[in-house]
């Protein structure tokens, strides 16, 4: 599951983008609307957004709850050889890496694939 954490809450990728800025939109917290864009700080109806290009998969970081405890909302991220958070080109690449390093398909269900904002790549 790919998505983002925003203000301590997980928002799953909807495969839709904002028509104004072109960034991903997520399910709206406001029941009157369908989607929200955190970049524009705007809520939208379904006709105000468009489908994300099927070929585009956002870069992701791999995270899991610290010590497997989800209650504290703390996450630990997979690091590269230099100690920085490892960024994969997309979720399938991250999953393949984890599978090649001994994790099972069932293990992948316990990971978050956190989308990397464009300005943080």
Image (spheres, rainbow, N blue to C red):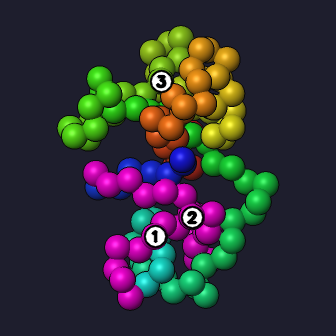
Q: Are marks 2 and 1 in contact (CB under 8 Å)?
A: yes
Q: Which residue is mark 2?
A: 14
What is the spatial separation of the Cα atoms under label 2 and label 1, in whole angstroms?
Answer: 7 Å
Instruction: Spot the residue most to the right.
Output: 55
Q: Position of residue 88 (x, y in %)?
A: 62, 33
Q: Position of residue 27 (x, y in %)?
A: 45, 70
What is the spatial separation of the Cα atoms under label 3 and label 1, in whole angstroms?
Answer: 27 Å
> Which quadrant: the C terminus?
top right
Of residues 121 and 26, which is closer to you in this image? 26
Q: Does the rendering let one see residue 119?
A: no
Of residues 113 and 20, which is closer to you in this image? 113
Instruction: Spot the residue most to the front.
Output: 106
Numbered tag placed on residue 78 in the rendering: 3
Instruction: Spot the residue most to the left.
Output: 72
Magenta portion: prevailing SS class? loop
Name the secondary structure under disc 2.
loop
Residue found 41% across the figure and 74% down from its top: 28
Numbered tag placed on residue 27 in the rendering: 1
Residue 88: in magenta span: no
Q: Position of residue 101 (x, y in %)?
A: 61, 14
Give neighbour class at mark 2: few <14, some 14-19, many 20+ (Cα, 10 Å): some
Residue found 38% across the figure and 88% down from its top: 32
Residue found 50% across the figure and 52% down from its top: 3
Boundaries of the magenta span = 8-32
């Amino acid at each position: 599951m790919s998505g983002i954490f925003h203000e301590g809450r997980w928002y799953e990728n909807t495969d839709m983008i904002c028509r104004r800025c072109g960034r991903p939109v997520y399910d709206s917290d406001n029941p009157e609307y369908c989607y929200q864009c955190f970049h524009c700080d705007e809520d939208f109806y379904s006709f105000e957004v468009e489908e994300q290009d099927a070929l585009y998969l956002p870069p992701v970081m791999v995270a899991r709850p610290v010590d497997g405890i989800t209650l504290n909302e703390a996450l630990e991220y997979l690091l590269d050889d230099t100690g920085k958070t490892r960024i994969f080109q997309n979720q399938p690449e991250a999953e393949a890496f984890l599978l090649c390093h001994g994790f099972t398909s069932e293990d992948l269900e316990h990971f978050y694939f956190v989308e990397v904002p464009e300005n943080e790549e």
